[in-house]
Image: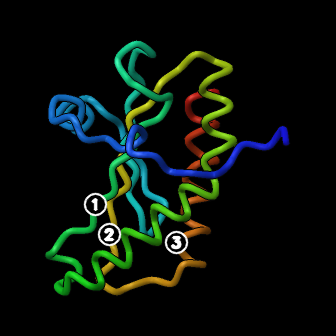
């Protein structure tokens, strides 16, 4: 009973234009291929939850909407399964994050490769921000 369900509610999605603009203007980034991660630490009061994310797959990389949507679903699912450690760490350190996951590859990757990239990205994010 002590375990928390791994869900991805709407409150964890980054949708405010001013937060998105600020993330891309002031945020720092790194690459965990095939993902580019842009992140920005913000005050805890500015966000509803500890971490808000945005997933983007450009039309220039994957032309078909079916493929773009499939990749976005895989990225969100991978994040949903691995987010607990990062959320717990950010809550303990009283930090809030804005995150954007940008897809870089020109072909549709399997869930396994995206999951490995997500694991590597979240681990390096935790070490970079001392979470």
For mark 1, give the secondary structure: strand
The residue at which mark 3 appears reads as: 114
- The reply, left or right, for residue 79 in relation to residue 41 is right
In percent of width and height, residue 97 lies at 44, 30
At horizontal 33% and vertical 57% (from top left) the residue drawn is 55
In percent of width and height, residue 77 lies at 52, 64
Quadrant where the C terminus is found in the figure: top right
At horizontal 84% and vertical 38% (from top left) the residue drawn is 2
For mark 2, give the secondary structure: loop
Does residue 99 appear anywhere in the picture?
A: no
- Are circles 3 and 2 on residues that touch, CB within 8 Å? no
Q: Check the image and name the residue furthest to the right.
A: 1
Answer above or below: position of 22 versus 38.
above
Viewer-side label of 3, 2: 3
At horizontal 17% and vertical 84% (from top left) the residue drawn is 63
Does residue 6 appear anywhere in the picture?
A: yes
* Circle 3 Cα neighbour tier, 10 Å, few/some/many (<14 / 14–19 / ≥20): many
- The reply, left or right, for residue 79 in relation to residue 73 is right
* Circle 2 Cα neighbour tier, 10 Å, few/some/many (<14 / 14–19 / ≥20): some
- Are circles 1 and 2 on residues that touch, CB within 8 Å? no
Which of the labelled discs sits on residue 104, or is there none?
Answer: 2
Answer above or below: position of 28 versus 95.
below
* Cα–Cα span, label 3 and label 2: 11 Å
The residue at which mark 1 appears reads as: 56
User: In the depicted view, which residue is nearer to us: 102 or 2?
Assistant: 2
């Amino acid at each position: 009973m002590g375990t928390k369900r791994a869900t991805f509610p709407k409150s964890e999605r980054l949708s405010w234009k001013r937060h998105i603009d600020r993330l891309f203007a002031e945020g720092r980034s790194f690459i965990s291929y095939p993902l580019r991660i842009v992140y920005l630490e913000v005050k805890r009061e500015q966000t509803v939850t500890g971490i808000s994310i945005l997933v983007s797959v450009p039309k220039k990389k994957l032309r078909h909407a079916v493929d773009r949507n499939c990749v976005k679903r895989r990225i969100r699912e991978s994040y949903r399964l691995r987010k607990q450690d990062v959320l717990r760490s950010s809550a303990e350190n009283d930090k809030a994050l804005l995150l954007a996951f940008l897809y870089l590859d020109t072909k549709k990757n399997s869930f396994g490769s995206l999951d490995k990239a997500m694991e590597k990205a979240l681990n390096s994010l935790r070490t970079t921000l001392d979470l």
